[in-house]
Amino acid sequence: MQRPERIRIKNESGQQQSLPEGDRYFQDLGGEGEILFLGLGPNPSVAAQIFPQAKNLYYLECPQHSAQLPEGYTIPSRFKQLNTEPAIDLSGFRVILYTPGKRLFPSFWEPLLAKLTVKRTGVMRKSHSKTIWLPGDDNSLLIPELCHAFESEGFSYRVIDPDAMRKNLVSLLHSELPELVLSVNFNGLDNAGETYFILREAGIKVAVWMVDNPFHILSGIKSTYWRKVPLMVTDHWFIPVLEEHGAQKVEHLPLATDPQIFNTGVVPYPALEERTVFVGRSSFPAKDNFFSGCAFNIEDEKAALKAIENATKPNFEWWAKRENIEKLWPGREVRSTGYRTEQSGLLWRILSLQKAGSELTVFGDDGWRQYLPDADIRPPVDYFTILPGIYAGAGINLNMTSPLLPCGLTQRNFDVWAAGGFLLSDYTPGLSIFPEELLTYCTFKTPAELPVKIEFIKSNPQRQKELSKNWHEHIMKEHTYKNRVRKILNFLI
């Protein structure tokens, strides 16, 4: 006997999905009063049979869902549809959730469920403390720097385990209502938006600072809820692109430095004053897993090398145009473009380091040895303890910016100068946040330029010293994480 064909509809990110049938897909969320179904599934008679004695039943349905139901989809007469406009108070009902619907259209259901959760659990909007929650741990990206900066602005801070925030949020909110939650790269926020909507319903300001390629981060999110989240990006190139994809509030917020870690009081690392130094890995951790199934073939490599020879950095924008990509979300296809960009970046770094001369020292992983067999390769170093001294002690520090951020900057663009060192960086349009007069002798546009640039700097120690001093003063005044925190607070007003 042939099984009946399941109803298939497109979810909110445009993917086709089947509607599973059966009473096991209905979850009783409790409550007292009339029975209200949030979604009826592919066969409403199944929902009706759960309460055979009830004379009247109520239901809500997502409009996007309803618009796709086939002809012949009938709803038993016992059901009365409720309108969500104006917003309905679910707390007066016994609520039954068709759970697959929540996964199909989380941006519709999660705000309603968040209202119910906050009201039922007694999490009130009144007694907010001047506290910021930062999802992560003490070693997570930017967490120590942001803790220092927010504390200097009069906030207490709490570093929240990301899993605990996703799984035990209501319990955490009972112990404390923070004023603000700041997530780096959506850390601590779930992919459907449940965490975000509960925080918002509790009257807590939420923002996400995406310090990596935004579409790599978003590639793991299937819900459109991210469009509602106030977003900050370290690379301004992504602002109009994110807006084209539906983002409602986006602002540019570059990286910065933490003077508690990088300052002119650090002790210089010994025996580097004549060396050109690069600190960085040949690839980021878990790269193979993130880019699983992606390819970078010989033709891609030839195209990237040709672009570099023609004084063009094959960055994310370059690859996206070459591949004629119109949509960067939803889906994981963007990672294929990202992988080709990442491999191009490796070529860019290799060529730059090969041109850096015989007095090159690299602090990084052993992957560099196959590309730089004659270089002085040393193990990775701790960011908070050893790195400041390296930046202060090196004759010249090299920086090559990831092409995954076409107009981005790196921590080196701030930390090296803060520590009193000298930085020679590849040029990106993101450097426009700095005064032009500071950039002239401190940037290169192609790897081929490096020998002349390095020789000029080494031959002009007085100018190098003056530039280092002027850069340090500018960074300390305009580009600390305290500066960035003030901008974050203004952004969320």
Image (tube, rainbow, N blue to C red):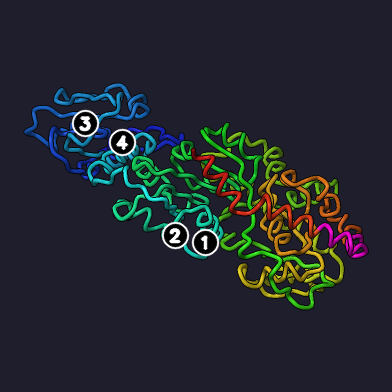
Mark 2, residue position: 159
Amino acid type assigned to the residue bearing label 4 in the image: Leu
In the displayed structure, does residue 399 sit left or right of residue 224? Answer: right
Mark 3, residue position: 44
Q: Are marks 2 and 1 in contact (CB under 8 Å)?
A: yes
Mark 2 or mark 4: which comes first in sequence? Answer: 4
Residue 397 vs residue 352, the one in the foreground: 397
**C-alpha gap between disc 4 and disc 1:** 32 Å
Other-residue count near label 4 (Cα within 10 Å), few / some / many at <14 / 14–19 / ≥20: many
- Highlighted range, magenta: 455-467
Residue 271 vs residue 356, the one in the foreground: 271
Mark 2 or mark 1: which comes first in sequence? Answer: 1
Q: Residue at x 57, y 44 (%)?
A: 487
Which quarter of the image is occupied by the N terminus? top left
**C-alpha gap between disc 3 and disc 1:** 47 Å
Q: Secondary structure at mark 3?
A: helix
In the displayed structure, does residue 48 sit left or right of residue 85? Answer: left
